[in-house]
Image (cartoon, helix red, strand yellow):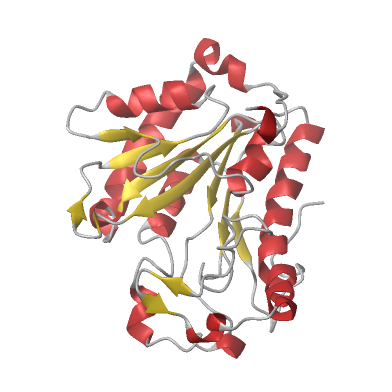
């Protein structure tokens, strides 16, 4: 049985994730690790001024709207984290030193500055683990019915970083498995109006991140799409990108010959064997 946000372990009745139901037979699962800047009431604002929670340090601006737009257009399942990455980052492994950020892009997070392991464990148990359990449960549900899902994770990035303008409109991040990356990156790059990065502006080679855990380690084809935030910081931009990406995905998923290699479990060696 799939985990429900209403029954997942959580603190103060704060549901750690939102799941939008969809047609699993389409073979696609969309994730949004940093969809919201929300914090449980008991944490207040983590000691930050309210305006800081509107910045990229708290969430991926625009991504919830894009994720919901894909769900509306494609009727595919979507799972989104409901909590701010400043509480605990669901796109980091449990042993990652940046799991709970103390300083982010020049902002000190007061309630994280001297955090102890007991509090980290509370946040793991209440928020981080239920989100990942929901993803794992969904994948198990699909596999039990003979469906091997492709996993697409949505993120956004700032148009400027440390004084440098980023030229990319979007980027596709990946690590060891390029089965879905190659056709998806190729389709996205056919739009001549777009500058598309291959493992830019970040690398997808992050051990323990969400796609490493649910994609690489489970042998599922996957990719991470980064969209520049100034392109999706309003409803019009979010709708435009949802339309663009859903159109590409419809074409890819309909091409059985192209997508067939993704419809299998692939086994990798250990991360250290790379």
- In which quadrant is the C terminus drawn? top right
Judge whether 108 appears above or below 34 on screen: below
Q: Residue at x 36, y 79 (%)?
A: 52
Give the tally of numbered discs.
Answer: 0
Q: Quadrant of residue 3?
A: bottom right
Which residue is more in the foreground, 105 or 158?
105
In the picture, measured across the screen, residue 47 lies left or right of residue 76, that is left
The residue most toward the front is 272
Q: Residue 103 at what x, y percent from top left?
A: 45, 74
Q: Quadrant of residue 53?
A: bottom left
Q: Residue 25 at what x, y percent from top left?
A: 65, 31
Which residue is more in the foreground, 170 or 237?
170
Q: Quadrant of residue 111?
A: bottom right
Residue 20 is at least partly visible in this image:
yes
Q: Residue at x 59, y 15 (%)?
A: 260
Residue 22 is at least partly visible in this image:
no
In the picture, measured across the screen, residue 64 lies left or right of residue 30, that is left
Judge whether 117 appears above or below 81 on screen: below
Q: Residue at x 23, y 35 (%)?
A: 195
Q: Residue at x 25, y 41 (%)?
A: 168
Q: Residue 231 at what x, y percent from top left?
A: 24, 52
């Amino acid at each position: 049985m799939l985990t429900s946000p209403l029954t997942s372990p959580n603190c103060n009745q704060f549901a750690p994730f939102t799941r939008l139901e969809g047609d699993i037979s389409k073979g696609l699962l969309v994730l949004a690790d940093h969809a919201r800047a929300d914090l449980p009431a008991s944490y207040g604002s983590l000691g930050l001024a309210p305006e800081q929670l509107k910045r990229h340090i708290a969430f991926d601006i625009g991504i919830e709207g894009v994720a919901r737009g894909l769900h509306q257009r494609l009727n595919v399942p979507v799972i989104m984290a409901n909590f701010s990455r400043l509480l605990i980052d669901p796109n980091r492994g449990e042993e990652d030193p940046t799991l709970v950020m103390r300083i982010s892009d020049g902002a000190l997070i007061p309630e994280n500055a001297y955090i102890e392991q007991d509090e980290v464990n509370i946040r793991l148990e209440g928020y981080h683990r239920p989100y990942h359990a929901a993803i794992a449960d969904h994948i198990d549900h699909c596999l039990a019915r003979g469906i091997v899902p492709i996993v697409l994770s949505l993120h956004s990035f700032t148009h400027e970083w440390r004084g440098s303008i980023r030229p990319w409109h979007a980027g596709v991040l990946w690590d060891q498995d390029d089965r879905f990356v190659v056709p998806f990156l190729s389709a996205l790059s056919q739009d001549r109006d777009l500058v598309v990065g291959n493992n830019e502006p970040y690398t997808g080679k992050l051990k323990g991140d969400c796609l490493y855990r649910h994609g690489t380690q489970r042998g599922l084809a996957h990719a991470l799409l980064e969209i520049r935030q100034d392109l999706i910081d309003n409803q019009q931009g979010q709708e435009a990108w949802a339309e663009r990406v859903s159109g590409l995905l419809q074409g890819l998923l309909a091409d059985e010959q192209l997508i067939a290699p993704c419809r299998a479990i692939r086994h990798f060696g250990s991360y250290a064997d790379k």
